Image (cartoon, rainbow, N blue to C red):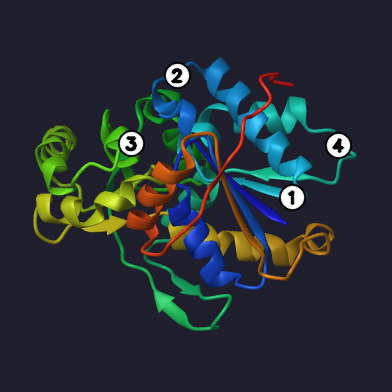
Amino acid sequence: MIGVFDSGVGGLTILKSIHKKLPEYSTIYLGDNARAPYGDLSQEQITAYTWEGVRFLFESGCSLVVLACNTASAQALQTIQQEYLRPDSGKKVLGIIRPTVEAMSELGQERGNLVTNEVTKLPQIKALGIFATQATVDSEIYLDEFKDQKSELEIYQQACPGWVMMIENGEDKNKALEIIKADIDKLFSQNSTIDAVLLACTHYPFFHDQVVQSLPAGIKVFDQGDLVADKLVDYIKRHTEINDQLDRTSKRQFFTTGKAEHVSKVAETIVGEKIDFEHIDLNTESR
């Protein structure tokens, strides 16, 4: 199975795209809602909590786990890959930052859709604004990844405290407009020529329309869902040893460390369909 882990319900925006691109593949989703948001935690806490979630997904039958959380990908992925995973385990943990950066670095190029074989021309941009959690911004991982890709994009980051919990608490979208506009103003005060923004937290697409409404006219807005899902399709095709382990019976399971009824309601507002979460308690041991 493919496991998808997030600190809350935001990772459902990635999972929805994975289901669209790989509908036959079985998935297990785990949201650590009880300890969200991760963006305000230390790197040590984020790594410990993320590893607990990954272990649960491994023990539930997943051989491939996607950290559908930018904060976890920025703060915990490297440690998990290099120190926690046994080389002979046959299991893999992937983040979502590198595939996002790879996709954004291809802007202006032609990209083939691995599912439909259609070719589309990606828009060209020069200056990219990134909305993310404080922990993701502080890690500077997006700056490093774009540098590794030798991208010519000018990158500007803006932390957005409060966005995640507004979503997790099921607050009205329009009530969030004032906070969203304030963070957009802070971003554009860095550079007024930004011509595209990336919602670099999987929760943020919930506010997609409010972001578009608050941005200057003509600014392109990118969510991560389809970008990451396309890269996952490519990864699976290239790694047959992983692909051969994955169940293809379209089974769907959803778990949360929070209150299942509340999480189910919030999840429905994000993905537009009813999802029944089951509550679980994670092992408190970090390794």
Amino acid at the residue labelled 3 = Val
Query: Which one is earlier in the sequence, the residue at label 1 or at label 2?
Result: 2
Q: Which residue is mark 3?
A: 164
Is the residue 202 above or below the residue 234 in the image?
above
Using residue 93 as the reference point, say whether residue 102 is left or right of it. Answer: left
Dot 3 alpha-carbon crowd within 10 angstroms: few under 14, some 14 to 19, many 20 or more: many
Contact (Cβ within 8 Å) of mark 4 with mark 1 = no
| Vertical arrangement, residue 109 with respect to residue 92, above or below | below
Q: Is residue 209 above or below residue 198?
A: below
**Residue type for callout 2:** Leu
Question: Residue at the location (86% across, 36% down)?
Answer: 87
> Which of the two labelled residues, at mark 4 and mark 1, occupies the earlier sequence position?
1
- The quarter of the displayed image where residue 107 is located: bottom left
Residue type indicated by callout 1: Cys
The percent position of residue 168, horizontal first and vertical second, equals: 35, 39
Residue 40 appears at what percent x and percent y? 39, 21
First in sequence: mark 3 vs mark 1 = 1
Q: Residue furthest front?
A: 261
Residue at horizontal 74 percent and vertical 63 percent from the top = 238
Question: Could you tell whether 231 is left or right of 120 in the image?
Answer: right
Question: Which residue in the structure is indicated by mark 1?
Answer: 62
**Residue position marked by numbered label 2 in the rendering:** 41
Residue at image mark 4: 87
Marks 4 and 3 in Cβ contact (< 8 Å): no
Q: Quadrant of residue 280?
A: top right
The CA span between labels 3 and 1 is: 27 Å
